[in-house]
Image (cartoon, grey):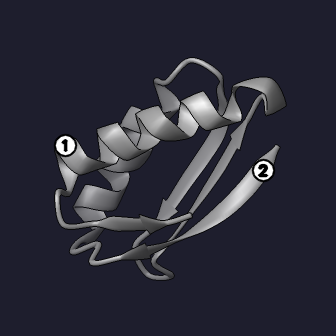
Amino acid sequence: MKKVFKLEDLDCANCAAKMERNILKIQGVISANVSFMNQKMTIEAEDDQFDAVMEEVVRVCKKVEPDCIIKR
């Protein structure tokens, strides 16, 4: 399953790159793209694990960019 999420308050391209690198380390993630310019995040993960993966994605992103909000 692949989904696109809108991001709010993502402050810099470096933070987007860090978020993407950390998301790709999460078990169950097939691909990930975090775009600072578009303020969007695309996540592809196994269908049966998607909700659990997204919980971990939110946790990882908050560590890198505490003010960033992922619109789900």
- SS at badge 2: strand
In the picture shown, does residue 17 fall above or below 38?
Answer: above
Nearest the eye: 18 or 44: 44
Q: CA distance from mark 1 to mark 2?
A: 23 Å
Which residue corresponds to the image point at 34% horizontal and 67% vertical from the top-left?
Answer: 69
Question: The N terminus appears in which quarter of the rendering?
Answer: top right
Q: Which residue is mark 1?
A: 63
Which residue corresponds to the image point at 51% horizontal and 82% vertical from the top-left?
Answer: 38
Count the marks: how many? 2
Nearest the eye: 65 or 15: 65
Q: Is residue 8 left or right of residue 45?
A: left
Q: Which residue is mark 2?
A: 2
- Residue 71 placement (x, y as % from top left): 50, 70
- Residue 16 placement (x, y as % from top left): 34, 59
- SS at badge 1: helix
Nearest the eye: 37 or 4: 4
Residues packed near mark 1 inside 10 Å, few (<14), some (14 to 19) or many (20 plus): few
Q: Is residue 54 left or right of residue 61?
A: right
Of the image marks 1 and 2, the number of the one nearer the N terminus: 2
Which residue corresponds to the image point at 78% horizontal and 28% vertical from the top-left?
Answer: 46
Name the image quarter holding residue 7: bottom left
